[in-house]
Amino acid sequence: MRRDIEAAGMSVAMVTTYPDFTHPDARQRERELALEQEAVAVTAALGGRLLRVTAGQAHPETGREEGIAWAVEGLRKLVESTRGSGVTLVYENHGKPGAWQYTDFSQPPDIFLEIARATADVGLGINFDTANATAFAEDPLALLDQIIDRVVSVHAADTAVRGELQHVLLGTGLTPFASLFRRLHQAGWDGWICMEENARQGRQGVVDAARFVRQTWQETANM
């Protein structure tokens, strides 16, 4: 697969995964760690730079404090056990992937920030998702400000409503891209922006989204 990717003149910026470190079964949490260690190895073999990770699901049996402790433990172990792989791990303020039964345990911004603070010293990066921040944070710009020094990559995505994630074509929803991009510029950030184009408009949707992201990034560079 790596040969095919490189033959097409492309490279892998990011692989996205969904570790469930908040599972109430300790044995399953151990399996989640092993699966993520394998995912790091696969990402490295593909020549990938980044691996997106999550805290885990909001299992009904998992309380707030124990869930935070388990997520922090799993994420720290993952970072420490994969040093030297050449892959940077980035933790996301996530919502709910289709592969999960429940929403992300750290969807609430206060839980996300607590886990982020508790993993800062091991070198875990942040993947800032613009749509999730818009949907679930009272102020997405304020959320970005609290972790901007940890942001390694950005998922550019858009949502039509607040309180839930409802993907729309980038630039047509509520996400304040100009304000967020301007703040990243001001911080001297110059990392990967990975589009999450989920408006189901086919190739044209991807083309339009890419044009919007590039144009908005360039326009906010000197603002």
Image (tube, rainbow, N blue to C red):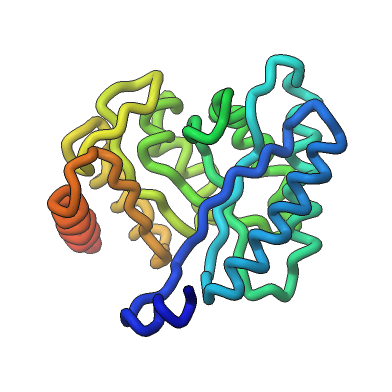
Q: Position of residue 159 (x, y in %)?
A: 30, 31
Of residue 116 and residue 155, the one placed in the foreground of this image is 155
Q: Is residue 53 left or right of residue 60?
A: left
Residue pictured at 19% horizontal, 48% vertical? 202
Of residue 146 and residue 19, the one placed in the foreground of this image is 19
Residue lying furthest top = 60
Of residue 56 and residue 93, the one placed in the foreground of this image is 56
Residue pictured at 17% horizontal, 48% vertical? 205
Q: Is residue 15 left or right of residue 193?
A: right
Residue pictured at 50% horizontal, 51% vertical? 127
Would you identify the image quadrant in which residue 106 lies? top right
Q: Position of residue 216 (x, y in %)?
A: 19, 54
Q: Position of residue 31 (x, y in %)?
A: 79, 45
Q: Is residue 134 left or right of residue 100?
A: left
Would you identify the image quadrant in which residue 207 lies? bottom left
Residue pictured at 42% horizontal, 34% vertical? 132
